[in-house]
Image: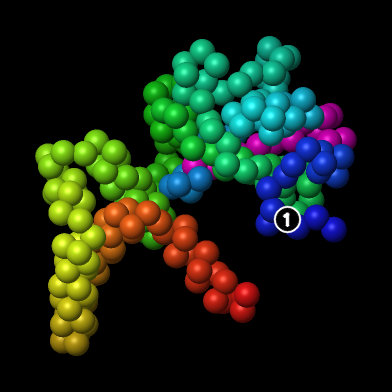
Amino acid sequence: MRDRNAPLNASDMGALAWDKMGGLLPAVVQDSRTLQILMLGYMNREALEATLQSGYATFFSRSKQRLWQKGETSGNRLVVRGVFADCDADALVVKAEPAGPTCHLGTTSCFSANEGEGIAFLPRLAAIVHERAEAGGTNSYTAKLLAEGPVRIAQKVGEEGVEVALAGAVGDRENCIEETADLIYHLTVLMEALGFGWEDVGERLRQRHSGS
């Protein structure tokens, strides 16, 4: 039995339920870094095969009746990190890194209400910190902190941790929220400096929870 936690490969094509929708499977595209839902498309066998072979998300256009690679004209391709099937093998999730806006209207996502809220903002925060790191320089506090290196960033994490503890000790809920936000921000910068992210932390927590 195929491991549903593993991404699909060419040998899995025959196990998918192509007959349910006339040879098409809905494919939800999710940003592999921020976890934001980017778009919905449809794949037939040829589109999925092209996606797996090229590494770029390719769909079947129901209106034009042909394959189309996302970004083939705009250049805003979706670099695929893995394709996963659901429990009934009749729907797909495509985890990808977008090379520019996904929506034809120029927005990050085709779903305007799909912005990270609450804990879901953490991957977006990590993406923002990464963008600052890629830009370099010292024009922002994040870039300046990254330029100072892991030792200075770790010092800031320690300072913010103490602030959280103090706010918690006196039962100051609002101040504890503020200080926790500061701590998480600085932790995110430290993770960027050391080359890992929230997905790595989440995976380690999952392993501990599952006993693996």
Residue furthest to the bottom in view is 169
Q: Name the residue under label 1.
A: 4
Query: Could one spot residue 109 in this view of the protein?
Result: yes
Figure quadrant of residue 69: top right
Determine whether 27 is above or below 144 in the image.
above
Q: Does the magenta stretch include residue 60?
A: no
Closest to the observer: 141 or 16? 141
Looking at the image, residue 93 sits to the left or right of residue 15; the answer is left
Q: Image point 21% across, 51% down: which residue?
A: 146
Mark 1 Cα-neighbour bin, 10 Å: few <14, some 14–19, many ≥20: few
Determine whether 212 is above or below 65 in the image.
below
The percent position of residue 48, horizontal first and vertical second, equals: 72, 31
Looking at the image, residue 74 sits to the left or right of residue 195; the answer is right
Figure quadrant of residue 72: top right
Q: Report the quarter where the C terminus lies.
A: bottom right
Identify the amino acid type marked 1: Arg
Q: Magenta stretch?
A: 16-31
Secondary element at image label 1: loop
The percent position of residue 105, horizontal first and vertical second, equals: 42, 22
Q: Image point 51% across, 25% down: which residue?
A: 77
Determine whether 188 is above or below 82 in the image.
below
Closest to the observer: 168 or 155? 155
Q: Does the magenta stretch include residue 30?
A: yes
Q: Image point 78% across, 38% down: which residue?
A: 10
The percent position of residue 34, horizontal first and vertical second, equals: 43, 47
Closest to the observer: 184 or 133? 133
The percent position of residue 30, horizontal first and vertical second, equals: 54, 42
Query: Could one spot residue 17 in this view of the protein?
Result: no
